Amino acid sequence: MRSDRPLPALALIALLWGAGAGAAAEGPPADCPAIVSQSPYLTHTLAWLGLSDCIVGTSRYDTLDRPRTGGVLDPDGEALALLEPALWFTSDWTPEERVQALTPPGTHAYRLDGFHSMAQVEENLRTIAAAAGLSDPAGRAAAFRGAWRAKAAAVAAGGKRALLLSACTGRPYSFGRDTWLYDLFTSAGFSVVETAERLHWSEPGEGLERLIGELNPQVIFLFERPGAKQCALPPIQGATRIVPLDGERFLHPAPILLQGLDQLIAKRAEWAGE
């Protein structure tokens, strides 16, 4: 944030930040651009690139202590304007017309994907690193690619049939083809049994049990979030093995997936039945 901003804007930003006008006035370090991250998966990506201190605003979904800039579908144009970011990264779920209408003068906006494949996660790293002026953006993306592929190979699932399941929207859904998790788990050697494209929504109880019976997985990976009651499922009848995984490590298409792969490796005895 520039030091020549009028005092009223500084005061409002301080209220948004919740840390006082002095903290808000400091802004990002002098050697990095002011960045707004409109989704937690982008915040994770920025953190892996060492750009957390450059973030001056985040969406309402984020846990980072920064001024809030609305949601992915409904960004807060006034908050964005007050923060005057050099860079605004958002999901391509944000409508293009909204991005064009709300991007402040002097801000470069980027709509990024990541939800279809690991290659998109890698490309996000390259795009963000280049936009932020970091050295060797392609090399950074390649380093992540090498890291996640090495960890995936270490999982060595041997073709075990797996259902990737979550209920963090309050209703169960499983991940199929054309998702980053399908890509990640198949690269780790699992045979992901969901046949639907993207996400398959089920009804709790008999609907979910019917799906499990049809797909016949050897293991169900259940992505949970600590303290999120809506992520919990009632007992599933007839399931041979259910292995809970930390959703924070898997449900963001970002480099935090490396921690997810570490958890898969650590839980091998649970999912492999060893």
Image (cartoon, helix red, strand yellow):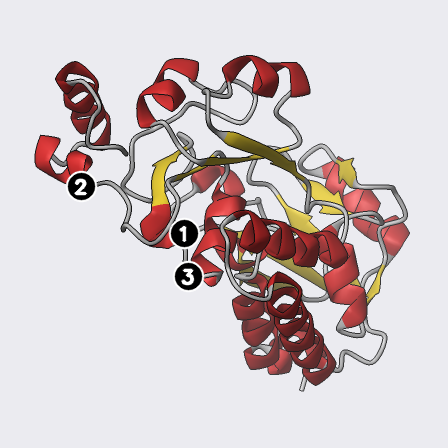
Could you tell whether 238 is left or right of 13 in the image? right
Q: Which of the two labelled residues, at mark 2 and mark 1, occupies the earlier sequence position?
A: 2
Residue 38 lies, with reference to residue 151, above or below; the image says above
- Tell me, yes or no, whether the two marked residues, 1 and 3, touch with CB atoms within 8 Å: no
Q: Quadrant of the N terminus?
A: top left
Q: Which of the two labelled residues, at mark 3 and mark 2, occupies the earlier sequence position?
A: 2
Residue 63, numbered circle: none
Q: Report, in whole angstroms, how far the alpha carbon at label 2 lies from the one at label 1.
A: 33 Å
Identify the residue position indicated by label 2 in the image. 26
Residue at 68% x, 76% y is 146
Q: Nearer the viewer, mark 1 or mark 3?
A: 3
Q: Report, in whole angstroms, how far the alpha carbon at label 1 lies from the one at label 3.
A: 26 Å
Identify the residue position indicated by label 1 in the image. 226
Q: Nearer the viewer, mark 3 or mark 2?
A: 2
- Estimate the x, y position of residue 182 in percent, counting from the top left: 78, 56
Q: Amino acid at mark 2?
A: Glu
Determine crowd level at label 1: few under 14, some 14-19, many 20+ residues with C-alpha closer than 10 A: few
Q: Report, in whole angstroms, how far the alpha carbon at label 3 lies from the one at label 2.
A: 19 Å
Determine crowd level at label 3: few under 14, some 14-19, many 20+ residues with C-alpha closer than 10 A: few
Residue 182 lies, with reference to residue 24, above or below; the image says below
> Which secondary structure, mark 1?
loop
